[in-house]
Image (cartoon, rainbow, N blue to C red):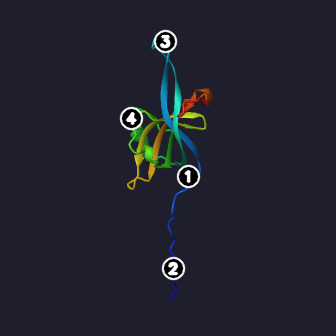
């Protein structure tokens, strides 16, 4: 009798497609309270893995009056468990993305970001959370 060897599931996934910086936009105003620009304020970094988008994902983006440019998977950090995705922004390789939607898996270990490309981000307009501009 021959015993079949079972293929074991990996203990953890690998996220080796790159890093994203997540945060929000801080509006700059002049002395008359007129809006003169905005600066990206980074809250943290996550390693990600790029995923292929399904037809349902493109339809969901269309319902939200957006276009889906990138779908990625990351680990779920504790500080993003209760954050509203509506104001969240991401930067990947100096390209700024609006977050259309963030899904979680049933075990709440992974996050799935649906991103819409906004444009190229100027290096001088990135601010770290400690208040220093990089």
Single out the residue that lies furthest toward the top.
32
Q: CA distance from mark 4 to mark 2?
A: 49 Å
Residue position marked by numbered label 3 in the rendering: 31
**Do the residues bearing badges 4 and 2 touch, measured as CB atoms within 8 Å?**
no
Residue position marked by numbered label 1 in the rendering: 15
Label 4 Cα crowd, 10 Å radius (few <14 / some 14-19 / many 20+): few
Q: Earlier in the sequence, mark 1 or mark 2?
A: 2
Q: CA distance from mark 3 to mark 2?
A: 74 Å
Place of residue 43 in the rendered image (x, y in percent of width and height, measured from the top left) = 50, 37
Residue position marked by numbered label 2 in the rendering: 4
Label 2 Cα crowd, 10 Å radius (few <14 / some 14-19 / many 20+): few
Is 4 rendered above or below residue 130?
below
Q: Earlier in the sequence, mark 3 or mark 2?
A: 2
Residue 54 visible in the current orientation: no
Q: Is residue 82 toward the left or the right of residue 73 in the image?
A: left
Q: Earlier in the sequence, mark 3 or mark 4?
A: 3
What residue sits 53% from the left and 30% below the top? 40
Place of residue 111 in the rendered image (x, y in percent of width and height, measured from the top left) = 45, 48
Q: Secondary structure at mark 1?
A: loop
């Amino acid at each position: 009798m021959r015993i079949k060897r079972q293929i074991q599931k990996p203990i953890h996934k690998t996220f080796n497609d790159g890093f994203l910086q997540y945060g929000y936009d801080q509006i700059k105003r002049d002395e008359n309270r007129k809006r003169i620009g905005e600066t990206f304020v980074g809250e943290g970094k996550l390693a990600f893995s790029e995923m292929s988008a399904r037809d349902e994902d493109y339809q969901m983006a269309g319902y939200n009056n957006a276009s889906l440019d990138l779908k990625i998977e990351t680990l779920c950090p504790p500080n993003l468990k209760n954050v509203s995705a509506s104001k969240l922004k991401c930067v990947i390789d100096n390209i700024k993305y609006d977050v259309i939607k963030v899904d979680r898996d049933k075990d709440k270990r992974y996050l799935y970001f649906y991103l819409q490309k906004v444009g190229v981000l100027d290096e001088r307009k990135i601010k770290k959370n400690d208040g220093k501009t990089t």
